Image: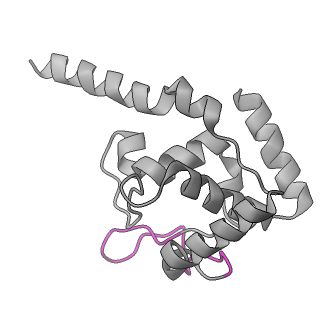
Amino acid sequence: MIILIIIIAIGLFNFVVNDNSAQASVSLKPKDKLLIKLGKKIYTQNCASCHGVNLEGEKNWMSRLPNGMMPAPPHDEKGHTWHHNDNYLFMITKYGVEEILGEKYPNNMPAYKEILSDKEIISVLSYIKSTWPPRVQKIHDQINSRSN
């Protein structure tokens, strides 16, 4: 029975992570002015309290807090957001870290699937990408190209 549960859990995890319909539709648009404006507004309302008004993240973001939680990482070019492809960023934001990893991961990042629409999530991520220097945006585009 336990083996069956494990197989089902792995299958569900793979479906969520490898859902081709979601992968095909996720593309950040850092040059779309209207989308960026919406994304900045939503970021300010939903993300800035932890990730910082200037996307700087929390201090010592790579070290666990005394309560075991990980601090919010920066989303600027000093962080690791741009190391991940568009689809991964979308899935983490929509479904949350634990659902994507398929295991317990102490963090304060909520899943936004019940809070923001897909378009709103894409707008926030597009806003974040729009703030990166051109060199970092180009590297991120290359990461996306390799992921397809």
Viewer-proximal residue, 95 or 123? 123
Magenta stretch, residue numbers: 54-72
Q: Main secondary structure of the magenta part?
A: loop
Q: Position of residue 125 (x, y in %)?
A: 64, 57
Is residue 111 toward the left or the right of residue 125 in the image? left
| Residue 144 falls in image quadrant | top right
Q: Residue at x 79, y 57 (%)?
A: 30
Q: Position of residue 100 (x, y in %)?
A: 42, 41
Question: Which image quadrant: the C terminus?
Answer: top right
Residue 59 visible in the displayed image: yes
| Residue 143 falls in image quadrant | top right
Question: Which image quadrant: the N terminus?
Answer: top left
Q: Residue at x 52, y 49 (%)?
A: 118
Q: Is residue 70 above or below residue 95?
A: below
Q: Is residue 7 located in the magenta-colored stretch of the structure?
A: no
Residue 75 visible in the displayed image: no
Q: Residue at x 26, y 19 (%)?
A: 7
Q: Is residue 62 above or below residue 8?
A: below
Q: Position of residue 16 (x, y in %)?
A: 42, 32
Q: Is residue 86 above or below residue 122?
A: above
Q: Position of residue 120 (x, y in %)?
A: 56, 58
Q: Is residue 55 located in the magenta-colored stretch of the structure?
A: yes
Is residue 109 toward the left or the right of residue 72 in the image? left
